[in-house]
Image (cartoon, rainbow, N blue to C red):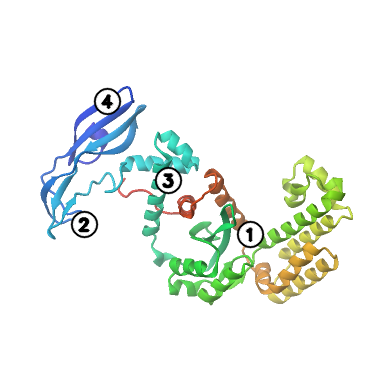
Amino acid sequence: MNLMLDFGDEWAVTKIETDHKLKEIYIYIEYKSDTYEDPRTLEPASLYDHSEMREWRHLDIWDYKSYIRCRIPRVKCKDGKVRQIALGWSDSHDRHTFHFEIRVIDLLKITRNQSKTAEFMGCSFRLVNRIIHRCTQRGLLRRDKRFFRFENISIDEKSFHKGHKYVTVLSHPISGVILDVSQGRDTHSTRELLTDTFTDQQRDLIKSVSLDMWKPYQNAVKSELPNAEQVHDKFHLVKYLNESIDKVRRREVANHEVLKMSRYALLKNQENLTDKQKEKFDLIKDSNLQVAKAWHIRENFKSLFDYTQNDTDAKTMIKEWAKDAISNGIKEVSKVAEMFIRHINGIANALISSFTNAMAERLNGKIQEVKLCGRGYRRFENFRSAILFFHGNLDLYPRNW
């Protein structure tokens, strides 16, 4: 049993009790070494006493829940204070072993679901959630910011609860790593997110920031990243045009039967349409409806990304596109076109940038998956920890295990 437990030579099993009715096993252990250390300084210390009997959840043995029971030695340190010795197989404030925690981490990575992990491990949701918080904090503390050498970053918003509550997501679009998440999407919180994540020297090295046209984001970038160009990437821009198409569709659907159940037929990429959606799309595309014209305007804008080579060409083509879009007299589309003109510099940067929107789309999908698996998050702290746990590329595991 000592070999199976693998807690080290200084710990030995002294007794095992079994409750067959509850299907639980209790493993009693004792510290057998004659030497003791101050857990903070690792200097030699003398035994003072033992704590009351405590219990830690351990890995199941067959289908029995397993618990470790132990009285932890306390030592008298050189500063005169009495402290518990370092266990080596559990953090001082936890009531589960590192072995148990590792299994939870592994299962979370497989299931992406806290409830299913808790059910499989036979523990509470609250314990799994606490492990996610602990591991995420551990991983963030282990990050060595000295090695951050990012020239391109992305700032995006994501809703996390009803009532227009948002978080701001800071990521590295090339690697797909989410660097951190802050509550809200105002200028102050975004500035804090940037200054907490990067040093002054690192912020000076950032050359471009992908973001939408949300003014507080632009103000924060202008303030904290003076050398970075703002890029309103394709993902965000097409999103605005999609929203305008859907608004036109909803306005016209009352008078045109063909537009019923056509939302996805108009907004999805053509290669992803089902046969039924393709049939619906073909009926609408060549009609004289305003929603069909709005769809063509969006496609014309997307084509700009294939031909623009320099800043002058980009701005000229954006202006020509906007003029044509406004000439169609579709108020929802005109509003977007006028907004694009007001932000022409950032859109021009997007047209001539070598970056695509593919990673932005994937990151958005990953965060949405976290949100759906968690069935929505009411507390920002839970949402942030879950995002960073799954997509922060953090060192999550306890060391030496």
Q: Name the amino acid, label 1.
A: Asn
Distance of mark 2 from mark 1, alpha carbons? 48 Å
Percent position (x, y) of residue 87? 23, 46
Label 1: which residue? 357
Label 2: which residue? 40
Q: Name the amino acid, label 2.
A: Arg
Percent position (x, y) of residue 164? 59, 57
Label 4: which residue? 18
Label 3: which residue? 129
Q: Secondary structure at mark 1?
A: loop
Mark 3 crowd level (few <14, some 14–19, many ≥20, 10 Å Cα): some
Distance of mark 2 from mark 3, alpha carbons? 28 Å
**Residue at (27, 33) in percent of width and height:** 4
Sequence-first disc among 2 and 3: 2
Sequence-first disc among 4 and 2: 4
Distance of mark 4 from mark 1, alpha carbons? 57 Å
Sequence-first disc among 4 and 1: 4
**Do the numbered discs 1 and 3 sit on residues whose CB atoms are within 8 Å?**
no
Distance of mark 4 from mark 2, alpha carbons? 36 Å
**Residue at (87, 53) in percent of width and height:** 286
